[in-house]
């Protein structure tokens, strides 16, 4: 009897061990299956998040900032150096107020720096050194309002290109006029006076002549970089505190 009891006990121990091993194995399978859905759930949640962040709802403030920041560059607004086909030089300063004198040869092309519409055109040199009226110092001149909202002005021209009249549409690189020494530049080396400002009604020459230094943008355009002056012009406009601040320098 003791021997038979020992066999029975041994058999019971073997059966118990087998059932225990089988139970662990069964318990691990659901864990493995549940890990897969967990990973799938994570991917399912992350994918929509990526899609949503890539196409956010329009924010007017952001749209305005990015549109104006043709800053580091913009595919919608293209800029070119405003003197074409000639060697040109300029400094990083200007007497009395912000502008840049671009020195080049007589008859060289002054072109539109960007797409836009012609603003004001002066086809007659009325400058008289005895009166030195500010409104006449530019001689022959052209200004355009760019598609970026900036006014671009060039003066001391020799001639105005055909078709350049108020309201005419122009493209970046289109001929606006030929460079000379008209106006107050008749006793200086040949150059085009280049100014940046915000648009105003006609005749506000002290704004038109320049309110922001153009040379950083000239440097960029010459190097083929699409840098926009629009943010700097908006900042200058805001700092002025008025649509048409009074003339205080070289008036």
Image: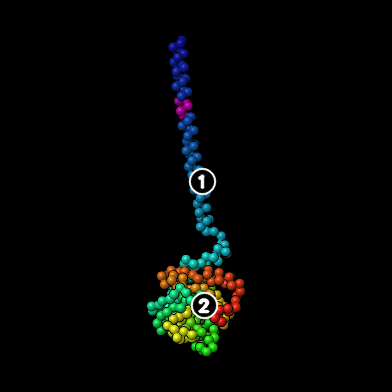
Relative image position of residue 134 (x, y in whole percent): 54, 84
Residue displayed at 52% across by 73% down: 212
Spot occupied by residue 7 in the image (x, y as percentages of width and height): 44, 15
Which residue corresponds to mark 2? Answer: 96
Where does label 1 land, which residue? 41
Q: Quadrant of the C terminus?
A: bottom right
User: Which residue: 48% across, 82% down?
Assistant: 155
Closer to the chain start, of discs 1 and 2, is 1
Residue 72 visible to the viewer: yes
Residue at the location (49% across, 86% down)?
183
Query: Over which residues does the magenta segment extend?
Result: 18-22
| Residue 246 point in image, percent of width and height | 60, 78
Can you say whether 96 is above or below 159 in the image? above
Mark seen at residue 148: none
What is the tally of numbered marks visible in this picture?
2
Front residue of 125/178: it is 125
Task: Report if residue 21 lies within the magenta region.
Answer: yes
Residue 169, placed above or below residue 8: below
Q: Is residue 202 left or right of residue 184?
A: right
Q: Main secondary structure of the magenta part?
A: helix
Q: Residue furthest right?
A: 242
Q: Is residue 178 visible?
A: no
């Amino acid at each position: 009897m003791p021997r038979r009891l020992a066999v029975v006990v041994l058999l019971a121990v073997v059966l118990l061990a087998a059932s225990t091993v089988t139970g662990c194995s069964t318990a691990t399978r659901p864990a493995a299956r549940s890990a897969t859905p967990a990973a799938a759930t994570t991917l399912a949640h992350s994918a929509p998040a990526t899609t949503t962040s890539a196409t956010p709802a329009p924010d007017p403030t952001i749209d305005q900032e990015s549109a104006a920041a043709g800053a580091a560059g913009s595919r919608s607004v293209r800029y070119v150096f405003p003197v074409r086909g000639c060697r040109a030089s300029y400094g990083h300063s200007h007497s009395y107020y912000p502008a840049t004198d671009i020195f080049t040869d007589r008859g060289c092309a002054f072109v539109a720096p960007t797409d836009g519409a012609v603003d004001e055109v002066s086809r007659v040199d009325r400058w008289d050194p005895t009166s030195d009226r500010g409104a006449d110092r530019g001689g022959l001149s052209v200004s355009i309002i760019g598609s970026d909202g900036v006014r671009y002005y060039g003066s001391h021209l020799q001639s105005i290109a055909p078709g350049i009249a108020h309201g005419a549409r122009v493209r970046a690189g289109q001929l606006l006029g030929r460079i000379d020494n008209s106006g107050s530049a008749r006793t200086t080396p040949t150059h085009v006076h280049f100014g940046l400002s915000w648009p105003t009604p006609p005749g506000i020459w002290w704004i038109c002549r320049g309110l922001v230094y153009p040379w950083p943008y000239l440097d960029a355009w010459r190097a083929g970089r699409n840098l926009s002056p629009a943010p700097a012009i908006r900042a200058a406009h805001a700092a002025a505190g008025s649509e048409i601040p009074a003339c205080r320098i070289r008036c």
